Image (cartoon, rainbow, N blue to C red):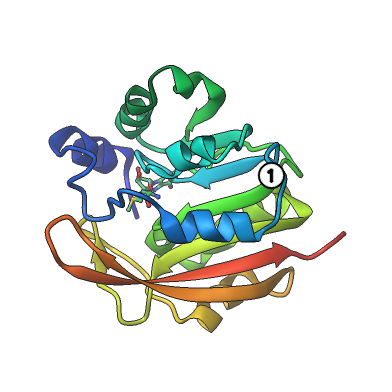
Amino acid sequence: MYSKDHWEKVYSSKPTNAVSWFQPHADYSLGLIKAAGVGLDAAIIDVGGGASTLVDDLLANGFTNVTVLDLSSTALAAARKRLGCRAAEVQWIEADINKADLPASQYDVWHDRAVFHFLTTPEERAAYVKTVFRSVKPGGHVIVATFAEDGPAQCSGLPVMRYRPDELHAEFGEAFQLLDHRKEEHHTPSGTVQQFVYCFCRRVGS
Ligand SMILES: C[S@@+](CC[C@H](N)C(=O)[O-])C[C@H]1O[C@@H](n2cnc3c(N)ncnc32)[C@H](O)[C@@H]1O
C-alpha cells in the first residue's frame, strides 16, 4: 500500500513546496472547515497533513486546538520548522492512520486531503472509516479530499483510488451525512493539473 520509507524519502529529497500536492494555501479545505461553523477552540485534526500549509492558516484564523498527524517525521519536522515558535501551539502525531490509537469522540473536524485515496483495499478503507467514526464526535464534520474520477491514477508514484462524490461518500456510509461536495482543479508546482473531489460530511448523531 504505502510505506513510511517511501514518504520519508519523498520529503527528504524535495523541498516541501515542490511536491505535486503542494498548495501555498489550502483554500478549499479552510473554506470547508469554516463552513462547519465550529468555534475557534474546536478540535481539528489534519490527517496525513504532512507539511501542508493548512495548519499555518488555521492558526492564523485563530483556531487553537489543531492536531496534525502524519506517517513522515520529515514532513512534520518541516511543518514545525516553518511555523517556528507557533509550532508549540499544535499537537503533532507521527503515526500511520490505520494503526493510530486516537481517542474516542475527540474531534469536531476531521480533515484529510490526499491520504484516503492511497487505501486501495476494502479492508484498509473499512479500518479508516471505523477510526473516523470512533474519533469524530457525533455531529462532528468530516472533510475528505481524493483524486476525482478524472484525476491521475497515481499520486507520488503510488497507485490511488479515484472517486466520484457519491462513490467517496458511499465509502463512509449512512453514518455520515453528505452536506456538500466540490471539485478542485489543483495546479501542481510543475504546472500540471489534477482534479480533486472534496466530500464534506457530518457524522450522524447529536
Ligand atoms: C499526497 S500527500 C498530502 C499531504 C497533505 N494532506 C496536503 O494536502 O498537502 C499524502 C500525505 O499522507 C501521508 N500518509 C500516507 N499514508 C499515510 C498513513 N497511512 N497514515 C498517515 N499519513 C499517511 C504522507 O506522509 C503524506 O504526507
Tell me the quarter of the picture where residue 13 sits. Answer: top left
Q: Please, is residue 36 above or below residue 7 in the view?
A: below
Q: Nearer the viewer, residue 28 or 109?
A: 28
Residue at position x 34%, y 38% in the image: 51
Residue 165 locus on image (x, y percent) = 51, 79
Q: From the viewer's perspective, is 46 left or right of 102?
A: left
Q: Please, is residue 202 above or below residue 140 in the view?
A: below
The residue furthest front is: 61
Q: Nearer the viewer, residue 197 or 189?
A: 189
**Residue holding disc 1:** 107
Q: Nearer the viewer, residue 192 or 100?
A: 192
Tag 1, which secondary structure? strand
Tell me the quarter of the picture where residue 133 sits. Answer: bottom right
Which image quadrant: the N terminus?
bottom left
Q: From the viewer's perspective, is 72 left or right of 91?
A: left
Residue 97 locus on image (x, y percent) = 51, 45
- Does the image show residue 127? no
Which image quadrant: the C terminus?
bottom right
**Ligand 1 closer than 8 Å to label 1 CB:** no
Q: Please, is residue 136 above or below residue 80 in the view?
A: below
Residue 126 locus on image (x, y percent) = 58, 62
Q: From the viewer's perspective, is 203 left or right of 7?
A: right
Residue 203 locus on image (x, y percent) = 73, 62
Q: Please, is residue 17 above or below residue 145 in the view?
A: above
Residue at position x 72%, y 75% in the image: 174
Residue at position x 34%, y 25% in the image: 77
Few, some or many residues within 10 Å of mark 1 (<14, 14–19, 20+): many
Q: Looking at the picture, which amino acid does disc 1 mark?
A: Tyr
